[in-house]
Structures are given as C-alpha cells and as structure tokens.
Amino acid sequence: MDGSIDDKSEDSPSSSGSSQPQNLSTVVHTITAVPTAIPNQPVQVQSVIQPTQQSVIQAAGQIQTVQVEEDGEGHLVRTDTDIGIEKRREILSRRPSYRKILNELSSAEAPGIAKIEEDKEEEAAITSIQTTIPSYVQTSAGQTIQIAAANQNELTTQGLQTITMTNAGQGAVTAAAMPAGTTIVQYTQGDGSQQFVTVPAGEVQAYQIRAPSSLPAGVVMATPTGITSPQQLAEESARKRELRLMKNRYKNREAARECRRRKKEYVKCLETRVAVLEQQNKTLIEELKSLKELYCHKAETE
DNA sequence: CTTAGTCGCCGTCAAGAAGC
DNA sequence: GCTTCTTGACGGCGACTAAG
C-alpha cells in the first residue's frame, strides 16, 4: 500500500516545505495511510518517523492535515471523509521521483549528503552512442568505401570531416536487429568521434546525408533522393521509424541507468539515516536509563 | 564436474508524470 | 496535444555457490 504521512505533532504546517526541523530528535508521528484502492476507508497505522522524512513527503505530495482520533484499542484512526480525498489520492497515485525525494532529504539534512545533480551530460550521452554501436560493426569484415558528400557545405557546417560507408551486411550486424544486407553509414566528426546510420543495401548511392534538427547533434538521417513509388515511401517511413525507435531505446537505456543510480543513492541515504537513528535511539535509551537511576537514587536518600 | 538456485546488473517496454 | 522524463516490471545474462 502506498501511504501518505501526516504529522500530528505540534506544528505540522502542510503549507510549509521550508520550515523543517533541523534537529534529528526522534518524534512520534502518526502515519495516515491513504489507500489508493479502497477510498475513504480509515486506516490504522502508527509509527515513528523523522521530521525530515515527514517534511519530504509533505513537500512532494502537499498533504493536507487530517483528523485523527484514537479508537478504543489505542489505535489512531483517521476520521475525515470529506473534501480533498480525491485530490490527495490523485496526487499520491505516483510516488515522487528518487531525485525529488533525495534532493528534499539533502536539503533538510546536514550538508553531508550530496544532491542528485541535474543531468548535464547530454553531450556525453551522445558521445557514448559511439562506443556502443561500433561493436556491431567492428566484428564484421566489412568493406570500407569512401564516398563523397552530396553537399559539402552542409556537411562542413555540421562539423563533419569524413564520411565512410561500411559495407557490413554480415552476421554481426543482423544480430543487432538489423535486416540482413543492411549497410552502416559511418561518419567522423571534427572531434574524432564517430556516428552510424543504417541504410538498406542497394540504395546507398541514392542517399544524401543531412542532419535534421530533430535529431541530437551529430546524428545523421540518410534520406533517399528521388523516391517516388509507394513502396519506397513505405520503406523510408519504416526506416525513419526504426531510427526513431533506436534513438528512443538508446535514450531509455541511459535513463534506466540513471534511474538505478538514483535509486541506489536513495537507498544508501536511507540506510545511513537508519544507522544514525538507531545510534540516537540507543543514546536516548541510555540517557533515560541514567536519569531514572539518578531519580531513584535521589528518592531513596530522601 | 555438472546442475540448480540465487544475486546483481542490464536493456527494453509500458504507463504515468512533467514539460513545453 | 505532443514530446520527454521517470520508474516499475520483466526477462536475459554472467558470476557465484552449494549440493549431488
């Protein structure tokens, strides 16, 4: 069950994401779990959480204050059934991202925890495609052919220096989900990095290399010139679709990596918090013990 | 040595959220 | 409304380990 957390202790302002307690003393909070599948049903949860954790979830989900009453057995029961439930459920239908959670945690926490940086690696990401795709190409014993650019000015404005066409229609390429006979068009940029596009065999000479604005810098679409028949148009659109899918898959691969990294970081952060809290709990228990002893000793002497 | 089970990592897809 | 981002779920793969 995906539950929201609502603070029942003293000053729980649902409006403020900024007024977070800075000390890490243990506070008993009431967790009001809002069932997403069974609406308006009171739930009974009590737990001990930290102020920062509570503030995180408040900030992410903008939780409202809810009425909580104690039932006969000492459980805390949520009793409000009126406005805001739908909205809250809507808000909570998806948990906030790890990036948000961890950044909130970091801002509330001591400065030891680093924030998750925004992605500023767009260029690096595009560079890494060059290290991925060549593995399909280098294993083939393809014939390399130098071709001339159809529009030299256009190419030079894109920073291209050489264009190399690699005839790589062997098994290594077909294993990479490319049709047999597919030709890889490879070109080298000014910085020495390489890019690849796929072109069906037999159509190479009819192609003009261009760089459409919709693609990331450096990725080139190969567009056939003089296509007239519906079949060629269909092939062309299929090719474009495949290229788009390849691009999406690549981006998602990177995104999944990032997501896993953030998740790991988030879990690590939580584990650290658990360790800290356990230690604090220990200390507090010891403190309570010694105070009790002191009090008993004093009472005995009087 | 082989096999089965487990674990961690990865790529992909799909769905929802967020941005424009 | 469309595109991009984020993340859960799923399956595949390799490494490791214990049992036979």
Image (cartoon, coloured by chain):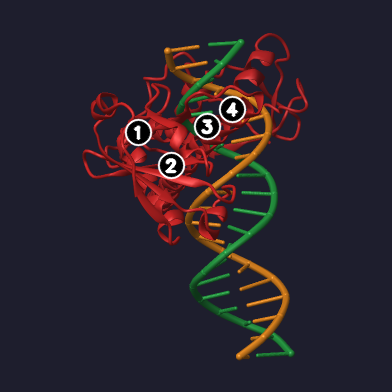
Chain colours: A red, B orange, C green
Q: Earlier in the sequence, mark 1 or mark 4?
A: 1
The answer to whether mark 2 and mark 1 are in CB contact below 8 A is: yes
Instruction: State the residue lying farthest toward the left.
Output: A191
Q: Earlier in the sequence, mark 3 or mark 2?
A: 3
- What is the secondary structure assignment of the residue under circle 3? helix
Which residue sits at x=60%, y=20%? A91
Residue underneath mark 1: A119
Q: Is residue C12 left or right of residue A186?
A: right
Residue underneath mark 4: A237
Q: Is residue A81 left or right of residue A179?
A: right
Which residue sits at x=47%, y=25%? A225
Specify the subunit that label 2 lies on.
Answer: A
Marks 3/4: CA–CA distance: 10 Å
Q: Are marks 3 and 4 on the same chain?
A: yes
The answer to whether mark 1 and mark 4 are in CB contact below 8 A is: no
At label 3, the amino acid type is Arg
Q: Which mark is residue A244?
A: 3
Marks 2/1: CA–CA distance: 9 Å
Along the line of sight, the residue nearer the viewer: A229 or A241 = A229
At label 2, the amino acid type is Glu
Along the line of sight, the residue nearer the viewer: C19 or A206 = A206
Q: Earlier in the sequence, mark 3 or mark 4?
A: 4
At label 4, the amino acid type is Ser
Marks 3/2: CA–CA distance: 21 Å
- What is the secondary structure assignment of the residue under circle 4? helix
Specify the subunit that label 3 lies on.
Answer: A
Q: Is residue A20 left or right of residue A240?
A: left
Which residue sits at x=45%, y=46%? A184
Q: Nearer the viewer, mark 1 or mark 3?
A: 3
Marks 4/2: CA–CA distance: 31 Å
Q: Is residue A97 left or right of residue A4?
A: left
At label 1, the amino acid type is Asp
